[in-house]
């Protein structure tokens, strides 16, 4: 039997066929990628993955709640000058961010939010329209040409809300600003704010009748609140809070009857927002005469029955002293020191103001006077501090600041505890009524209202409160300077107390959607570690630079004395050879010192520039290099696998 001959081997593929296959594969991959992008854009237009640490590109639940609840259309017109972005790139990047967020709003509103993008060129009808809305124009160069970057919103009733100029510095609050604008347009009526206070916030007619200059006028904060809200007085003996009241401000509550406390309690149980300002010692009352011509003996206030039942404590027997922001006041006449720091009156600044809350994040300072602390007594309520003291603080008995306070002695005996005390906080949670047995009997001689709402044993939903243990926040002299300007009263704030109260009332009136709206992070985030490295590099040279500068100043001063011939205190008309040599030596020393100083500054600048250059290289070149190395490694691994397969 003859052996079979081996089968003939197939001829190798021509290189041209391999090249055509590779080109066809690349073309197919390109078509597949484009098709996938088109299908994704059409089928999943809003699909995204937010990998930022602070969820910068994810709208909050509060915004989604406002947008989903829109009943009537809202039109948002973005007036943006493209020249602004071309001249200042940071505004161009921020404009893209604003457009992206507006498109998210339109997509979530089911067509209720309509967008218009307008470029107000100089001397155009669009520019006139922007000015008519109140959009702010700013010069971009010395030619005087105005550029615009603002947002105007309107509803079917022609109500308008405007953000005159969108600043990148407020990027953290962009979502809040936009949501508040949409919320106001969907609810054009001004929120009703009730005001219950033992202080004459709306003026004192008795003092005005006595024609005392500056006395009896409404507090500046009351006038400011009227610009944004419908402000209504609530009587101290009220047995029910009007149903249309959205926010109730209770400031310096004193001697309230059980019927009034029950009215406040049920207002909160029905979902009303409460802003409480108690005080262990009211400097405002202590400086105003009472009905008998003398200040009242009791200047403390509290809402203990309600707050304690809700798990909150605001004691009135202790006052917080803070040395870091203490204000300087006149000392007692018998003291030799004319001015001294008074730690009972202090400014809360910097890290004492919460940066996470929209009401306090942009404030510079808030002034407190004889303030007390606040705390949560139970775990059933969410207690979020808004303002705290600095660690350089302590607690003292209220009597030490109420009865003949001695600022010098108080400062001499000051011993900081190192603890931060909460001065103002938000409280949120399910609350139980402080009157579990129902309404108390009406005051003597009064009848219970026939339309008194039904008793509620607990809050309908999470209650929202703001608690501050200092009613002097509202006192004019602690935050604003009122002057007469040609017959008109002008108020110039020097502290942010007014802005704080307005912001807090604003967020409370906005409902749960705006209260829960968190402040946003910034997409343009600095490199914290890099900034720390830069400061360390600078610190290494500043001490040497300071020593060289002092030596240079001393040498220049000595040179001036030698030139004037007054080095020994007497005038001389002829400069001796010794003095000439000394002058030449001083000049040489000045030249050498200046050279060393320039070298130190050059080293500092070189280190900083080197750090920046290294970071640029890492950011620009490192990623492509890593990708290239990965591709090379992958190719080598695949070639080795192929070689092994052939073997």
Image (cartoon, grey):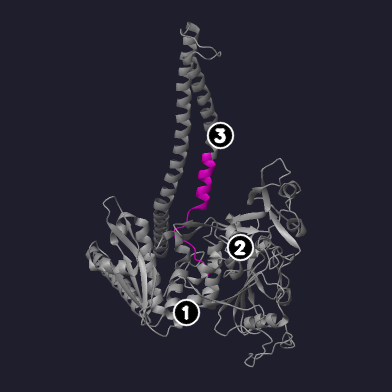
- Mark 3 vs 1, N-terminal side: 1
Element under label 3?
helix
Residue denoted by label 1: 66
Residue furthest to the bottom in view is 450
Q: Quick one: label 2, few (<14), some, or many (20+) residues within 10 Å? A: many
Measured as percent of width and height from the top left, residue 378 is found at 73, 73
Q: CA distance from mark 3 to mark 1?
A: 56 Å
At horizontal 52% and vertical 45% (from top left) the residue drawn is 533
Location of the C terminus (image quadrant): bottom left
Q: CA distance from mark 2 to mark 1?
A: 32 Å
Write the start and end of the magenta stretch as one range: 518-538
Q: Point out the frontmost of discs 2 and 3.
A: 2
In this rendering, does residue 59 appear at all?
yes
Residue denoted by label 2: 473
Q: Nearer the viewer, residue 246 or 301?
A: 301
On residue 543, which mark appears? 3
Q: Is residue 527 magenta?
A: yes
Q: Point out the frontmost of discs 3 and 1.
A: 1
At horizontal 50% and vertical 78% (from top left) the residue drawn is 191
Total marks shown come to 3
In this rendering, does residue 4 appear at all?
no
């Amino acid at each position: 039997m003859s052996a079979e001959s081996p089968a003939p081997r197939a001829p190798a593929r021509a290189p041209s066929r391999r090249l055509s296959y590779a080109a066809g594969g690349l073309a197919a991959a390109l078509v597949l990628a484009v098709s996938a992008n088109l299908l994704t854009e059409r089928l999943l237009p809003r699909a995204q993955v937010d990998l930022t640490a602070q969820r910068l590109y994810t709208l909050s639940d509060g915004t989604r709640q406002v947008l989903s609840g829109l009943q009537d259309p809202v039109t948002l017109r973005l007036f943006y000058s493209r020249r602004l972005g071309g001249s200042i790139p940071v505004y161009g990047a921020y404009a893209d961010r604003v457009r992206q967020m507006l498109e998210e709003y339109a997509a979530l509103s089911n067509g209720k939010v309509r967008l218009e993008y307008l470029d107000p060129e100089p001397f155009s009808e669009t520019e006139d329209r922007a000015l008519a809305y109140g959009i702010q124009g700013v010069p971009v160069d010395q030619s005087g040409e105005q550029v615009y970057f603002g947002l105007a919103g309107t509803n079917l009733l022609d109500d308008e809300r405007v953000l005159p100029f969108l600043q990148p510095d407020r990027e953290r609050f962009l979502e809040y600003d936009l949501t508040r604008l949409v919320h106001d347009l969907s609810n054009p009526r001004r929120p009703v704010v009730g005001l219950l206070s033992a202080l004459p916030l709306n003026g004192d007619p008795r003092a005005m009748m006595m024609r005392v200059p500056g006395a009896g006028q409404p507090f500046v904060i009351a006038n400011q609140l009227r610009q944004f809200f419908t402000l209504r007085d609530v009587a101290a003996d009220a047995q029910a809070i009007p149903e249309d009241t959205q926010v109730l401000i209770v400031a310096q509550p004193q001697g309230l009857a059980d019927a009034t406390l029950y009215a406040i309690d049920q207002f909160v149980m029905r979902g009303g927002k409460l802003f409480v300002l108690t005080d262990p010692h009211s400097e405002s009352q202590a400086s105003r005469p009472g009905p008998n011509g003398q200040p009242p003996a009791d200047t403390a206030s509290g809402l203990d029955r309600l707050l304690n039942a809700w798990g909150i404590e605001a004691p009135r027997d202790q006052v917080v002293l803070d040395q870091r922001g203490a204000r300087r006041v006149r000392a007692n006449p018998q003291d030799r020191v004319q001015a001294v720091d008074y730690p009972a009156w202090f400014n809360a600044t910097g890290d004492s103001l919460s940066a996470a809350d929209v009401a306090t994040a942009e404030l510079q300072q808030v002034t407190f006077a004889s303030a007390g602390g606040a705390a949560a007594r139970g775990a059933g309520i969410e207690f979020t501090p808004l303002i705290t003291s600095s660690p350089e603080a302590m607690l003292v008995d209220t009597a030490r600041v109420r009865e003949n306070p001695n600022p010098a002695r108080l400062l001499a005996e000051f011993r900081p505890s190192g603890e931060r005390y909460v001065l103002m906080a938000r409280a949120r949670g399910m609350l139980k009524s402080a009157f579990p047995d129902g309404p108390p009997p009406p005051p003597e001689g009064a009848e219970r209202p026939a339309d008194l709402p039904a008793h509620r044993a607990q809050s309908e939903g999470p209650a929202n409160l703001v608690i501050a243990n200092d009613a002097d926040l509202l006192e004019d002299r602690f935050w604003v300077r009122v002057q007469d300007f040609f017959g008109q009263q002008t108020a110039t704030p020097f502290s942010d107390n007014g802005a704080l109260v307005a912001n807090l009332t604003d967020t409370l009136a906005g409902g749960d959607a705006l209260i829960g709206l968190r402040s946003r992070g910034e997409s343009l985030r600095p490199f914290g570690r890099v900034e720390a490295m830069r400061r360390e590099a600078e610190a290494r040279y500043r001490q040497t630079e300071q020593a060289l500068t002092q030596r240079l100043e001393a040498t220049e001063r000595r040179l001036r004395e030698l030139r004037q011939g007054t080095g020994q205190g007497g005038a001389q008309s002829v400069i001796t050879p010794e003095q000439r040599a000394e002058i030449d030596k001083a000049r040489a020393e000045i030249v050498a010192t200046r050279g060393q100083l320039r070298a130190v500054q050059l080293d500092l600048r070189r280190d900083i520039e080197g750090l920046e250059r290294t970071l640029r290289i890492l950011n620009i070149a490192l990623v492509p290099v890593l990708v290239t190395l990965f591709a090379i490694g992958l190719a080598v691994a695949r070639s080795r696998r192929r070689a092994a397969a052939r073997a």
